[in-house]
Amino acid sequence: MKWQGINEFVAVAETHSFSLAAKNLNLSTAQVSRQISALEKRLQVKLFYRTTRKVSLTQEAQLFYQHCRNLLDGLDIAEQAISNLQSSPQGKIKLTAPVTYGEQKILPLVNDFVSLYSDIEVTTELTNHRVDLIDGGFDVAIRLGQLQDSTLIAKQLSQRSNYVCASEAYLQKYGEAHSVSELKQHNCLLGTRDYWRFIESGKEKSLRVKGNLRCNSGMALVDAALKDIGIVQLPDYYVQSYIESGQLMTILDQFREPAEGIWAVYPQNRYLSPKIRLLIDHLAAHLQ
């Protein structure tokens, strides 16, 4: 009897939504609501403040949540311990990653991982939007650059550098920029931002640039640079192979920002199961 309503309570506490909690638990919203009401009656305490727009925890519920989360994590650990004795790692993992980096770097490694551990099922959603891991039911997310959410636990997998480059034909025709300010005289091919980042005199600098082409696809910008249209600033995984082959030339290397981290992040209140740790370690080993 003491376990009744605990799963529903934790799900609502983490999603701040009865409907999302019901979806994650594969239950009806009415059933979740009934379980919470029964739990409140048994504890003789109000657990949630409910309005039409928001669900928030009472002070008593915040304390109760920490203990319940630990109990559920302990149950997961116990079940996983038995599972590890009986078989190889198994179960489901839900992963999210940025689109291009996911296609080029993450998904090939995920495919290798699944071939090594056939009892693990991995679902990957590629999106450039910063999704909420709890609401989306994700076990782990791949994030690039600066981390904004301090409530997540992060493991660095690799790093990336931004390069400013153009084709040799473009540079021969319009000349090479030798300072950051000279970019204002060039056709700068734009992505989702209208500024580029540099380090100048030891300080970070954002320079607003202009050009006759704007696109939210890095591959399309690379294609434009290869066709001598203008200059691009893009992460290494877009342009590295073209730089090595000589199809693109780097400029302003002395003003390049330090490399940024590439991270695997997961909620700090989630037990990191062996299958998820295996996947993160696999990505880290091959992305280094």
Image: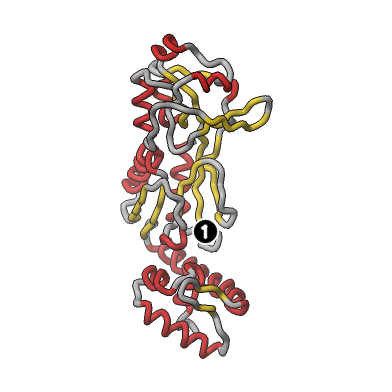
Residue shown at 40%/72% (left/top)?
19
In this rendering, the answer to whether 87 lies above or below 176 is: below
Residue shown at 42%/71% (left/top)?
21
Residue 72 at what x, y percent from top left? Answer: 50, 71
Q: Determine whether, in the image, residue 174 is placed left or right of residue 149.
A: left
Image-quadrant location for residue 107? top left
Disc count in the image?
Answer: 1
Residue 273 at what x, y percent from top left? Answer: 47, 59
> Element under label 1?
strand
Q: Count neighbours of disc 1 (C-alpha within 10 A) and say few if under 14, some if 14 to 19, many if 20 or more.
A: some
Residue 75 appears anywhere in the view: no
Image-quadrant location for residue 241? top left
Observer-nearest of 135 and 169: 169
Observer-nearest of 87 and 251: 251
Residue 65 appears anywhere in the view: yes
Question: What's under tag 1, amino acid-wise?
Answer: Pro
Residue shown at 54%/31% (left/top)?
208
In this rendering, the answer to whether 197 lies above or below 54 is: above
Residue 61 at what x, y percent from top left? Answer: 58, 77
Snapshot colouring = secondary structure
Observer-nearest of 145 and 75: 145
Residue shown at 39%/32% (left/top)?
214
Residue identified by numbered label 1: 267
In this rendering, the answer to whether 205 lies above or below 144 is: above
Q: Determine whether, in the image, residue 118 is placed left or right of residue 139.
A: left
Residue 268 at what x, y percent from top left? Answer: 55, 59
In this rendering, the answer to whether 281 lies above or below 17 is: above
